[in-house]
C-alpha cells in the first residue's frame, strides 16, 4: 500500500471536476462532525480511489477529499439518543442507513456517514469497497507469497544441481579407474594364450563320453521343461491368464467396433450437417448441431488414441500391460459427464429439428448410407452412454483374473475406483435417460422393430398381459366365453403403454414379440377409451355380464382408414382400473399438450411452446424453484428442485397435464408434505380457482382468445397446418374422432355459402347434434364444400384450445360425446366474428359444452358466454377430478390406511356433485370416483398369506418325496407373489427397513425378508435330513429342477431362495454329495446362479426383468439396494430448503417398476397340501445345527 501521496492543488481540482462529471458514485451524504451529535450534509463524488466532498451540488471547489486505498467499509448501528422523548421525531432518523469507512493509515479517524435509503447505502458501501482496491492488495500478497516460494524452489534446485555436478565428476573418475583395470586384464589374457595353445589334444574316447553326457543332460532338461510347461498349462494361474487374455482380446474388438461407430457418427452425420448449416438455406443451425453432437468429435479422437494403444499392447503379446492406458484415459473421461448430462437434451433438439421437412429429408439420406447398416442417428447418439459402464465391467473381470501379486493390479484397481466414482457423479444425469434405454430394450424385443420407440418424447408407462376379444364387422363382439381355453391362449397379448402410443404384440415360442398386422400400433390421439359401455347398448351390456365387467374398449379412428374397435380383457378389476387410469391420463396428456401446440407459435429451437416461453415461472430458475434442461412429456422443463407450494402449483396448472409429474408426485409426496395438504389444495382449486391458480397461468390460459383477432397468414394456412410433426398432430380435420371433430368441424360442410360462424345462435339452440356410432365409417368429404377463408380458418384454429381443455373429462363415453356440431346460419344474417363481444375460444367452449345436453339449471347461456369464470371453473373441476381419479385408482392404499382422508375426499366429491353447473361428463366421472372409493370390490380380494397360514380345514401336509417339482415351484411362486404384492409402496420411502424400529415402520418388507429366509432354510434343512449320500444328491437335483421351473415362471426370488440355500457352507462343503450330482444339474445350477448373481448390481437379473413380461416376482433386495443408494447419495431437501424433485423422480421410477410386478397376479390355483408343507416351520433347522449336522455327515479331513 502507498505510504504517501504527492499532489498539487491544480491536480486535485482537475480530479474533483472529473469526479463531478464521471464519478463512479455521486450524491448527498451526511458526515458526522467532530462533535458526536452533529451531522453535516455534503455532496460526495467518488472517482477511482479518491472520495471528494463538496459543500453543495453546484460547488466547483471541493471541501476535502479522502484517499480510499486500503480502507474498509462496514455498516454501523444507529447512534443512541440522549433523550427518550419525541418518539415521532426520531422515527425518520432511525430509518436512515449508517456506515463507517475505516482507513489503514495510523492516526486517521474513521469517516462516519449516513444516507436516507438502505439501497443507496448499500450501493455506496459497494462502490467504496471497489475503490479500496482490497481485492488487488490481497492478490498482491498472494503473488508475493508465490514469488517467495518460487525463489526458495530455485535456490533448492541450484543446490541440487551443484550436488549432481559433483556426483558426475566422481563418476568420471570412477570410469577412468575401471578403464585402466580393463586394460590390465586384457594384457594378462594375452600372456596366457601361448600356454593354452601348447596343451595336448584330448583322448577321442573322452570326447565321446562328454558328447553322450551332453546329450543326456539336454534330453533330461527338455523332458523336465516339458513337464513344467504341461503342469503350468493345467494350473489355475494359467487358466486365469487365458481368461484374462480373452477379456483383453474381447475388449480390443469392442473398442474397434465402438471407434467405428464414432467414425460413422462424426463422418456420416456431424461433419455433413456442419456443412449443411453453412449453406445459403441451412436446414439446421450451427447451435443445434453443437447441441446434438456435444463432445462427439472429442470422444472419437480420445478413443482413437486409446484403441491405438490397445493394438500396440496386443503386438507385444503375451506381455499385456494395460494400466498405463487407463491412466492416460482417466483424466479425459470428464467429457463423458458433459455428454451424458446433455444426452436427453440433444435427443429432444434432434426431435425438434426433424419437424423441419428439409432436415428430415437430409437426415434420411445420411441414414441410408450403407455404413449406418439401417441404424438411425438416435441409436448412434446412445452408444457413448454405455461406454463407462462397459469399462467398469471389463475392469471387474480383469481384476477377477489378475493375481494379487501382478504388477498392474493396483493400477487397475485405481482405474476402476476412478471410473466408479465418475459413474456415481453421472448417476443423476443418467437417471433421466432410463426411459430411453427402456424403450430401446422393448424395441429390440420386437422382431419387426418399432420406430416410434426411438422418439425421445415417448415415456414408458406400463406393460402386461391382456386378452384381446375377437370382433366382427361394425364393432359387434363375437359371443365367446371368458373361460374358453382357446380364447386365453390365442387371444393373449403383450401390451405396452407409452405416453403417445399403445402397442399390442403376440409372443412367439422363442420369446420374441411380433406386432399385430392390424392394430399393432395404436396412436392414442386417434383413440377413444370407453371405460364403461353405455347401458343402452345391448351388445355392451351383454359383454359386461359375459366377461364379468373386466373388458374395456378402445375405439380407433385412423385419419385415412375405416374405424375399428379393440376390446381387451384384464385379469382382474384392479388391473382393469389401473390400465384405464393410465390410458385415460395419457390421452388427456396428449390432448392438453396439443392445446398449446395448436394455439401458440413456437419461437424457440427446442420444442417449448410460446405459452411456456411467455411464462418465466415455467422455465426460469427462481428462489423457490430450479429447472433442468430435460423436457417432460408436455414439452415443459422438468423440475430439479422446488418448494412444496410450487409443486402443488404445478400439480394444478390448467395449461397442461403431465402424467410423469403426476406419478412422481403421488408416489413421493409423503417425503415432503401430507395427504391433507394435497387434498386441501385440490379443494381450494375447485372452490376458488381464480384465487388458487396463479394470475399468469390464467392470463396465458386465455391468450388463445387473442389469436382469433390476429391477421390471417398470407398463404391461407395456419402455422399448425403447415408444420410437420414427428408424431401425430394434436388434431386433424379429416378424422372422425369425437374430440377432434369438436376441435375442427366448425364450418358446415353442407352449406356452400356459409358465412362467419355465429356461435351465439348455436349455443342458444336446443336441437341436439347428429351423432354417429363409434364403429361407423367416417362421413365422406363433400366435393361441393368450399375451402374456408383465411379468416374463418384462423378462427377455427384459435377456438378449440380452451374449449377442449374445459371439455376433456376424466371419463368419456360415445353416448355423451357429440360427434359433429352442425351450425345453421339465420337467414340473411352476415356478422363478422371479429365484432363478437366474446372471444371465439370462449364461445366455442360454451357451445360445445352445451351441445346435446341443454343448459344446467341455474346458469343462463348468455351469462356463460360473457363470463370467463364458467370456463375456468369447468377446467379447474376437470383438473381436480383427473388428479383424484388417478389418486384413487392407482394409490388406493392411501385411503385404506387413512379413513379421515377417505371421508374428506368423499365429502369433496359429494360437493362437486351438488354443483348445478356440472357438465354430464364431469358428473359421470365424479360418480365413478365415488363408486370406486366407497364400494369394496369383492371380486378383487386377493389371497393373503395370513389366510393360508390360518386355514384349519387343510388336509394333512404332504412330504417332500410325494410332491412333484412342478407343484413345489408353482406354490412357491404363488406364496412369493402373495408376500411381494402385499408390500405397500409407502414402505419403500425413507429407508425404514434399515432403522432400529424397522419392524414397526416396514412390517411388510420385514415379512418378505423373513419369508425369504424361511424358504431358504427349508431347502437346506430338507437336504440335510437325509442320512445317505444318494438321497441328498437326489434332493439337490430336485430342488435345482424346482428353481429352474421358478425361472420359467419368472419367479426370480424363488430362484435366489433355492440357490442361496445350496450355496450355504453347510451344504456347499459336502464334496462327496456334490460328486454324486449329475453334470447336467451342475450346469443348470451355474446357469441359475449367473442369472441371479449380484455381480454388477444384479446386471443379469435386471436385463432379464427388462425382457420378461409380468407376472413376475423380482428379488426385492435389488430394489432396496437401489433405493438405499439414492437415499444415501442425495438428500430430500437442498441447502435452500427446496424439495429435491430429481431424487423423487428416481425413487418413483423404482417404485413404478415394483408396482408393475405387484399388480399382475399369477393364474395359479392354491393347493393347501403343498403350501402347508412349505410354511411348516417345524421342518426348519437353525444355522448352527445345520453346520454341526454337516460336519457329522462329512467330517473335516485331517490337516
Image (cartoon, rainbow, N blue to C red):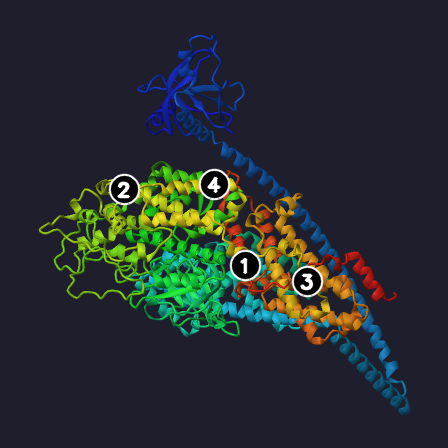
Picture quadrant where residue 837 is located: top left
Q: Please tell me which of labels 4 and 2 falls first in the chain.
A: 2
714 relative to 946 in the view: left or right: left
Give the residue drawn at x 52%, y 22%.
105
Furthest residue toward front: 953
Question: Which numbered circle lies on residue 1157?
Answer: 1
Q: Please tell me which of labels 1 and 4 falls first in the chain.
A: 4
Estimate the spatial distance between the alpha carbons at disc 2 and disc 1, rounded to whole Å: 47 Å
Element type where label 3 sits in the image = loop
Pointer 3 with pointer 4, Cβ within 8 A: no
Report the mark closest to the observer, 2 or 1.
Answer: 2
* Residue identified by numbered label 3: 955
Report the mark closest to the observer, 1 or 3.
Answer: 3
Give the residue drawn at x 61%, y 73%.
315
On screen, residue 1065 above or below 688:
below
180 relative to 642 in the view: left or right: right
Element type where label 1 sits in the image = helix
* Residue identified by numbered label 4: 903
Report the mark closest to the observer, 2 or 3.
Answer: 3
Amino acid at each position: 500500500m502507498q505510504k504517501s501521496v504527492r499532489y498539487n492543488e491544480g491536480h486535485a481540482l482537475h480530479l474533483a471536476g472529473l469526479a463531478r462529471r464521471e464519478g463512479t458514485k455521486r450524491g448527498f451524504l451526511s458526515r458526522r462532525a467532530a462533535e458526536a451529535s452533529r451531522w453535516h450534509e455534503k455532496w460526495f463524488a467518488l472517482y477511482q480511489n479518491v472520495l471528494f466532498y463538496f459543500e453543495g451540488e453546484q460547488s466547483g471547489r471541493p471541501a476535502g477529499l479522502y484517499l480510499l486505498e486500503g480502507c474498509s467499509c462496514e455498516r454501523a448501528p444507529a447512534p443512541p439518543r440522549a433523550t427518550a422523548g419525541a418518539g415521532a421525531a426520531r422515527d425518520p432518523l432511525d430509518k436512515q442507513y449508517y456506515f463507517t469507512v475505516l482507513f489503514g493509515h495510523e492516526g486517521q479517524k474513521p469517516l462516519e456517514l449516513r444516507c436516507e435509503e438502505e439501497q443507496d447505502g448499500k450501493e455506496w458501501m459497494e462502490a467504496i469497497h471497489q475503490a479500496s482496491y482490497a481485492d488487488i492488495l490481497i492478490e498482491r500478497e498472494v503473488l508475493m507469497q508465490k514469488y517467495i516460494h518460487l525463489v526458495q524452489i530455485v535456490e533448492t534446485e541450484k543446490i541440487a544441481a551443484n550436488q549432481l555436478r559433483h556426483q558426475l565428476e566422481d563418476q568420471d573418475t570412477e570410469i577412468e579407474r575401471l578403464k585402466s583395470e580393463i586394460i590390465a586384464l586384457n594384457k594378462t589374457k594375452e600372456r596366457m594364450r601361448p600356454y593354452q595353445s601348447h596343451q595336448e589334444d584330448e583322448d577321442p574316447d573322452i570326447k565321446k563320453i562328454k558328447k553322450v553326457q551332453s546329450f543326456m543332460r539336454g534330453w533330461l532338461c527338455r523332458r523336465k521343461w516339458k513337464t513344467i510347461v504341461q503342469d503350468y498349462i493345467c494350473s489355475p494361474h494359467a487358466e486365469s491368464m487365458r481368461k484374462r487374455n480373452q477379456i483383453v482380446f474381447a475388449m480390443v474388438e469392442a473398442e474397434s467396433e465402438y471407434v467405428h461407430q464414432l467414425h460413422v457418427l462424426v463422418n456420416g452425420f456431424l461433419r455433413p450437417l456442419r456443412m449443411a448449416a453453412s449453406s445459403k438455406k441451412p436446414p439446421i443451425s450451427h447451435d443445434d448441431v453443437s447441441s446434438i453432437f456435444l463432445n462427439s468429435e472429442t470422444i472419437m479422437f480420445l478413443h482413437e488414441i486409446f484403441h491405438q494403444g490397445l493394438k500396440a499392447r496386443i503386438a507385444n503379446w503375451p506381455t499385456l500391460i494395460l494400466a498405463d492406458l487407463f491412466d492416460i484415459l482417466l483424466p479425459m473421461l470428464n467429457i463423458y459427464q458433459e455428454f451424458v448430462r446433455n444426452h436427453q437434451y440433444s435427443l429432444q433438439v434432434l426431435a425438434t429439428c426433424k419437424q423441419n421437412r428439409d432436415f428430415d429429408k437430409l437426415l434420411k439420406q445420411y441414414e441410408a448410407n450403407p455404413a449406418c447398416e439401417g441404424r438411425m442417428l438416435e441409436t448412434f447418439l446412445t452408444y457413448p452412454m454405455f461406454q463407462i459402464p462397459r469399462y467398469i465391467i471389463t475392469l471387474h473381470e480383469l481384476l477377477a483374473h489378475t493375481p494379487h501379486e501382478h504388477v498392474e493390479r493396483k493400477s487397475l484397481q485405481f482405474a476402476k475406483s476412478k471410473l466408479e466414482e465418475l459413474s456415481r457423479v453421472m448417476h443423476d444425469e443418467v437417471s433421466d435417460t432410463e426411459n430411453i434405454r427402456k424403450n430401446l430394450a422393448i424395441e429390440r424385443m420386437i422382431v419387426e422393430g418399432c420406430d416410434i420407440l426411438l422418439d425421445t418424447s415417448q415415456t414408458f408407462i406400463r406393460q402386461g398381459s391382456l386378452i384381446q376379444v375377437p370382433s366382427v364387422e361394425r364393432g359387434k363382439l363375437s359371443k365367446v366365453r371368458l373361460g374358453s381355453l382357446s380364447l386365453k391362449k390365442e387371444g393373449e397379448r403383450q401390451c405396452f403403454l407409452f405416453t403417445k402410443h399403445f402397442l399390442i404384440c403376440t409372443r412367439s415360442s422363442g420369446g420374441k414379440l411380433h406386432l399385430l398386422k392390424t392394430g399393432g400400433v395404436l396412436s392414442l390421439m386417434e383413440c377413444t377409451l370407453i371405460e364403461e359401455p353405455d347401458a343402452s347398448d345391448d351388445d355392451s351390456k351383454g359383454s359386461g355380464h359375459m366377461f364379468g365387467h373386466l373388458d374395456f374398449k378402445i375405439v380407433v379412428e385412423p385419419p385415412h382408414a375405416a374405424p375399428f374397435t379393440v376390446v381387451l380383457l384384464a385379469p382382474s378389476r384392479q388391473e382393469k382400473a389401473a390400465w384405464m387410469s393410465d390410458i385415460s391420463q395419457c390421452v388427456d396428456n396428449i390432448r392438453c399438450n396439443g392445446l398449446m401446440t395448436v394455439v401458440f407459435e413456437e419461437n424457440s429451437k427446442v420444442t417449448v411452446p410460446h405459452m411456456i416461453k411467455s411464462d418465466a415461472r415455467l422455465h426460469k430458475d427462481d428462489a423457490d424453484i430450479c429447472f433442468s434442461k430435460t423436457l417432460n412429456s408436455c414439452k415443459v422443463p422438468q423440475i430439479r428442485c422446488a418448494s412444496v407450494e410450487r409443486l402443488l402449483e404445478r400439480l394444478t396448472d390448467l395449461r397442461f397435464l403431465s402424467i410423469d409429474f403426476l406419478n412422481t408426485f403421488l408416489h413421493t409426496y409423503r417425503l415432503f408434505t401430507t395427504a391433507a395438504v394435497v387434498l386441501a389444495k385440490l379443494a381450494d382449486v375447485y372452490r376458488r380457482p381464480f384465487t388458487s391458480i396463479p394470475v399468469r397461468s390464467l392470463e396465458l390460459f386465455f391468450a388463445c382468445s387473442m389469436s382469433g383477432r390476429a391477421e390471417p397468414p398470407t398463404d391461407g394456412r395456419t402455422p399448425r397446418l403447415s408444420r410437420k410433426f414427428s408424431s401425430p398432430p394434436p388434431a386433424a380435420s379429416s378424422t372422425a374422432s369425437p374430440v377432434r371433430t369438436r376441435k375442427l368441424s366448425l364450418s358446415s360442410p353442407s352449406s356452400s355459402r356459409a358465412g362467419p360462424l355465429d356461435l351465439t345462435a348455436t349455443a342458444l339452440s336446443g336441437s341436439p347434434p347428429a351423432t354417429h356410432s363409434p364403429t361407423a365409417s367416417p362421413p365422406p368429404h363433400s366435393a361441393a364444400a368450399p375451402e374456408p377463408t383465411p379468416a374463418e380458418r384462423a378462427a377455427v384454429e384459435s377456438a378449440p384450445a380452451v374449449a377442449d381443455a374445459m371439455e376433456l373429462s376424466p371419463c368419456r363415453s360415445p353416448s355423451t360425446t357429440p360427434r359433429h356440431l352442425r351450425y345453421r346460419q339465420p337467414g340473411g344474417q352476415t356478422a363478422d366474428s371479429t365484432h363478437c363481444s366474446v372471444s371465439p375460444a370462449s364461445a366455442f367452449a360454451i357451445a360445445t359444452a352445451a351441445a346435446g345436453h341443454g343448459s344446467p339449471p341455474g346458469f343462463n347461456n348468455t351469462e356463460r358466454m360473457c363470463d370467463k369464470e364458467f370456463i375456468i371453473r369447468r377446467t379447474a373441476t376437470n383438473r381436480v377430478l383427473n388428479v383424484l381419479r388417478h389418486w384413487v385408482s392407482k394409490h388406493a392404499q392411501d385411503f385404506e390406511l387413512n379413513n379421515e382422508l377417505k371421508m374428506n375426499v368423499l365429502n369433496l366429491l359429494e360437493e362437486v356433485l351438488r354443483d348445478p353447473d356440472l357438465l354430464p361428463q364431469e358428473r359421470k366421472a365424479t360418480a365413478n370416483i365415488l363408486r370406486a372409493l366407497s364400494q369394496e370390490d369383492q371380486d378383487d380380494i386377493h389371497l393373503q398369506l395370513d389366510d393360508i397360514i390360518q386355514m384349519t380345514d387343510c388336509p394333512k401336509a404332504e412330504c417332500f418325496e410325494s410332491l412333484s417339482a412342478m407343484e413345489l415351484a408353482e406354490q412357491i411362486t404363488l406364496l412369493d407373489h402373495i408376500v411381494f404384492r402385499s408390500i405397500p409402496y409407502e414402505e419403500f420411502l425413507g429407508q425404514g427397513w434399515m432403522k432400529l424400529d424397522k419392524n414397526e415402520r416396514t412390517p411388510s418388507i420385514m415379512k418378505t425378508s423373513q419369508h425369504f429366509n424361511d424358504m431358504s432354510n427349508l431347502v437346506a434343512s430338507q437336504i440335510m435330513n437325509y442320512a445317505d449320500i444318494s438321497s441328498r444328491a437326489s434332493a439337490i437335483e430336485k430342488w435345482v429342477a424346482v428353481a429352474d421351473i421358478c425361472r420359467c415362471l419368472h419367479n426370480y426370488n424363488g430362484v435366489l431362495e433355492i440357490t442361496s440355500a445350496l450355496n450355504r457352507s453347510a451344504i456347499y462343503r459336502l464334496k462327496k454329495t456334490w460328486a454324486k450330482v449329475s453334470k447336467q444339474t451342475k450346469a443348470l445350477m451355474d446357469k441359475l446362479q449367473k442369472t441371479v448373481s449380484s455381480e454388477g448390481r444384479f446386471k443379469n437379473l435386471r436385463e432379464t426383468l427388462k425382457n420378461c413380461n409380468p407376472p413376475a416376482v423380482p428379488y426385492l433386495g435389488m430394489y432396496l439396494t437401489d433405493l438405499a443408494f439414492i437415499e444415501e447419495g442425495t438428500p430430500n431437501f437442498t441447502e435452500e430448503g427446496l424439495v429435491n424433485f430429481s431424487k423423487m423422480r428416481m425413487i418413483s421410477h423404482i417404485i413404478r417398476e415394483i408396482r408393475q410386478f405387484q399388480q399382475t397376479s399369477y393364474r395359479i390355483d392354491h393347493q393347501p397340501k403343498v403350501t402347508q408343507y412349505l410354511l411348516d416351520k417345524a421342518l426348519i433347522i437353525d444355522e448352527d445345527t445345520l453346520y454341526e449336522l454337516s460336519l457329522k455327515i462329512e467330517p473335516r479331513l485331517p490337516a
